[in-house]
Amino acid sequence: MLAVRGLTVDIQASRILRDVTLEVGEREVVALVGRNGAGKTTTLRTVMGYLRPAAGDVAFKGRSLVGLPTHAIASLGIGFSPEESEVFGDLTVAENIEIATWTRRSARTPAERVERAYAVFPKLRGYAARGGTQLSGGERKMLSVARALALDPDLLLLDEPFEGLSPAIVPLVAESIAEIARLGVAILVAESNIHHVPERTSRLYVLERGEIVFAGKPQDALRDAAVLRIIGGAP
């Protein structure tokens, strides 16, 4: 479904990504793990068209995304929840979710898509009339993912979905992501903590200083001392 090949990205004359290659299949959950500054956000933002690669290609369902504007990429069926959540503070929770239904046509009606978002994040239903600025960090994160889900995507990009969350909120977000996977939506999640990688993850990539240094099954990464040192899982 998503194929990233030889991706090289420069930002302000600095090389951030070097020959990054990864893929996500239909209905698959894939994790991109690396410490802060490794290039995870740059990878996701390049997929979404915010950044243009210096070399390499990003293809979705066989179509190159390079050069397409972000709204066009979203309309093809890729939802994105950024690390900073970036909910609209002057809109209500309901309006934040509904606005995603304007971006892409799908077989589901807008009402069905909104209802599915609330079904995955039931806590947000009680906050429907609350403004975006009246939410906690965890609630904003849930809203950001719910809004991306209301796009009715085939692929969902999640950038650090657990970053900054309180221990009480982490299990709620984890279960919601698991439910999205059960719905059949493919997921590419970027995480700095390997222990936050979703349970349904079938493939894991480790990014270090802009390069992929491991690609394989999560259980193999957990047995690799060098990988664990990189991602903070071992002393």
Image: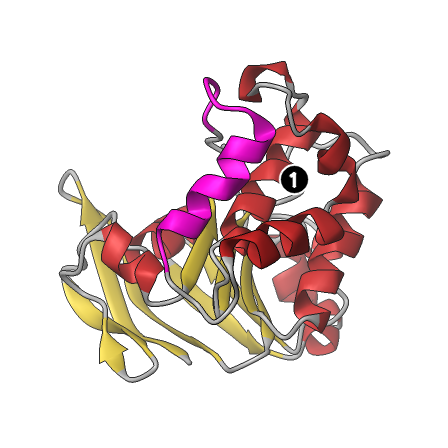
Q: Toward the viewer: 179 or 90?
A: 90
Q: Residue at x 51, y 61 (%)?
A: 109
> Is residue 98 in view from this perspective?
yes
Q: Would residue 72 be counted in the magenta stretch? A: no
> Is residue 16 in view from this perspective?
no
Q: Residues within 10 Å of mark 1 (few under 14, many from 20)?
A: many
The answer to whether residue 154 is above or below residue 14 is below
Q: Residue at x 66, y 29 (%)?
A: 128
Q: Quadrant of the N terminus?
A: bottom left
The answer to whether residue 16 is above or below residue 90 is below
Q: Residue at x 33, y 67 (%)?
A: 76
Look at the image and name its color scheme: secondary structure
SS type, badge 1: helix
Q: Toward the viewer: 171 or 163?
A: 171
Tell me where the magenta segment starts and ends, as one range.
88-104
Q: Is residue 166 left or right of residue 225?
A: right
Q: Is residue 63 left or right of residue 89?
A: left
Please name the amino acid that badge 1 sits on.
Answer: Met
Q: Position of residue 62 (x, y in %)?
A: 29, 84
Q: Where is residue 175, by image quadrant?
A: bottom right
Q: Position of residue 196 (x, y in %)?
A: 72, 53
Q: Would residue 91 be counted in the magenta stretch? A: yes
Identify the residue position indicated by label 1 in the image: 142
Q: Position of residue 82 (x, y in %)?
A: 47, 42
Q: Position of residue 188 (x, y in %)?
A: 53, 64
Q: Where is residue 178, by image quadrant?
A: bottom right
Q: Is residue 147 left or right of residue 127?
A: left
